[in-house]
Image (cartoon, rainbow, N blue to C red):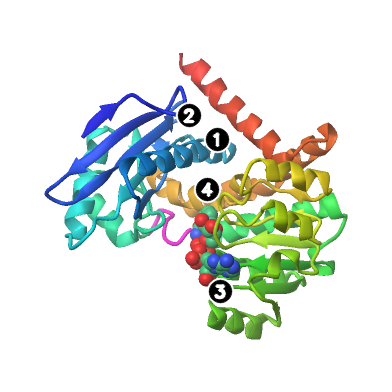
């Protein structure tokens, strides 16, 4: 394991992970520990080279700093990115080697599940270090699947944002949901319960049909969902749903969903603003997941998770109100707020 200096931001620290015996090859990027240990999941994916993996780790670590700060968690931001090995490898051994590397950092980094990793992988990590979250829940500790908590936060944020910006209740609105996986389906159930009309799309046709049958939702093609005849667009699939093209064709007046990195480029925030479409920033809206995952590590119970998740709606309201007052994108206001929280904590610690 080698600590090396080059980094895309002044505070970023990267730790190279290399263990030929197990095939471990990756990087831990630590963006900030001003608020607490750098927390962020471990991504296990194919990357052409370590430079590409490092770029992704740094980008994601910065995102985690902002997300954790805005969720008012006592955590900084970090991320691990591991390259998926070519050929055969012993998965358990690889994650044990990763756990050893995490442990060697002495708690500066707390890992968890992310794209390409599972609870079983984290169980292997936990044999080598206690700096891991996202394991199975115990009797008095929160934990387990974060998706229902993420969906609850998105639902609350959407209801608050709809009242504020559309002057309407969800019962009088139509919501277009892109992606009805773990979070999207849970969100749809809450929306249906609240009386909202639903338009849904998913590349998994069977999943889409099953949910439409259960909730009476209308199905549209995945290519049509962003331009669907709806009041609210909820991206709950992969990142990059908001592009210049999708925003130009959008009929919805509010965007509020679970997906990470919804803006394909930062300029899309301006395009939304120019069209008068209100955007509730993704990482503020979808913080329920990290709140649940980190609760295990922080030793918090389910009641604390519920309290923290219940603050997402009011936080989104404050952001949207400030953005409207200043005629700016809420995405920009959120970034500035997160940076101020992190800078304030760093100053206090200095
Ligand atoms: P998931 O994998 O369970 O669901 C994603 C769904 O989107 C799948 O049903 C998939 O078939 C569908 N999909 C993929 N590409 C699509 C496309 N082009 N058009 C329509 N549907 C498409 O994932 P999950 O856990 O529900 O997460 C959804 C999003 O929310 C992801 O972006 C994730 O990063 C983000 N998120 C999830 C959290 C959680 O607690 N699970 C926490 C924070 C963010």
Q: Does the residue tagged 1 have its C-beta within 8 Å of any atom of ligand 1?
A: no
Task: Find out whether the residues at labels 4 and 2 contact each other: C-beta distance under 8 Å.
Answer: no
Q: Residues within 10 Å of mark 3 (few under 14, many from 20)?
A: some
Give the left or right position of residue 331, taking residue 68 as reference: right
Residue 76 in the image: state x and y as whole percent: 46, 33
Q: Residues within 10 Å of mark 4 (few under 14, many from 20)?
A: some
Q: Residues within 10 Å of mark 2 (few under 14, many from 20)?
A: many
Depth order, front residue of 210/151: 210
Q: From the image, tell me which residue sits under label 2.
A: 35
* SS of the residue under disc 4: helix
Direction right: furthest residue: 167
Q: CA distance from mark 4 to mark 3?
A: 36 Å
Q: From the image, tell me which residue sits under label 1.
A: 69
Q: Does the residue tagged 3 have its C-beta within 8 Å of any atom of ligand 1?
A: yes
Task: Find out whether the residues at labels 4 and 3 contact each other: C-beta distance under 8 Å.
Answer: no
Could you tell me which residue is drawn at 79 percent across and 67 percent down?
230
Q: CA distance from mark 2 to mark 3?
A: 39 Å
The quarter of the picture where residue 152 lies is bottom right
Q: Residue 304, labelled with which disc?
A: 4
């Amino acid at each position: 394991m080698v600590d090396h200096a080059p980094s895309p931001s002044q505070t970023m620290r990267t730790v190279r992970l290399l263990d030929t015996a197990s095939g471990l090859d990756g990087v831990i990027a630590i963006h900030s520990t001003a608020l607490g240990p750098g927390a962020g999941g471990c991504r296990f994916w194919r990357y052409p080279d370590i430079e590409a993996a490092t770029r992704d780790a740094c980008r994601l670590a910065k995102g985690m700093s902002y997300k954790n700060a805005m969720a008012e968690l006592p955590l900084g931001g970090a991320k691990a990115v591991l390259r998926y090995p070519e050929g055969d490898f012993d998965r358990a051994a690889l994650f044990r080697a990763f756990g050893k590397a995490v442990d060697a950092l002495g708690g500066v980094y707390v890992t968890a599940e992310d794209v390409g990793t599972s609870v079983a992988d984290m169980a292997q990590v936990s044999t080598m270090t206690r700096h891991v979250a996202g394991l199975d829940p115990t009797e008095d500790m929160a934990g387990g699947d974060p998706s229902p908590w993420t969906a609850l936060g998105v639902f609350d944020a959407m209801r608050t944002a709809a009242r504020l910006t559309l002057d309407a209740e969800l019962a009088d609105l139509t919501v277009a949901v892109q992606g009805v996986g773990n979070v999207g389906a849970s969100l749809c159930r809450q929306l249906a319960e609240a009386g909202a009309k639903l338009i849904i799309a998913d590349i998994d046709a069977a999943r889409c049909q099953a949910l439409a049958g259960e909730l009476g939702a209308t199905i549209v093609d995945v290519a049509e969902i962003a331009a669907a005849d709806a009041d609210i667009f909820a991206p709950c699939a992969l990142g990059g749903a908001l592009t210049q093209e999708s925003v130009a064709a959008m009929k919805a007046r509010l965007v509020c969903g679970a997906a990470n990195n919804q803006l394909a480029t930062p300029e899309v925030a301006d395009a939304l603003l120019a069209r008068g479409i209100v955007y509730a920033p993704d990482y503020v809206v979808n913080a329920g997941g990290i709140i649940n995952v980190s609760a295990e590590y922080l030793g918090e119970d389910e009641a604390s998770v519920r309290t923290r998740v219940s603050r997402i709606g009011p936080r989104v309201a404050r952001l949207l109100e400030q953005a409207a007052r200043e005629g700016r994108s809420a995405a920009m206001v959120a970034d500035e707020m997160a940076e101020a929280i992190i800078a304030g904590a760093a100053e206090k610690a200095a």
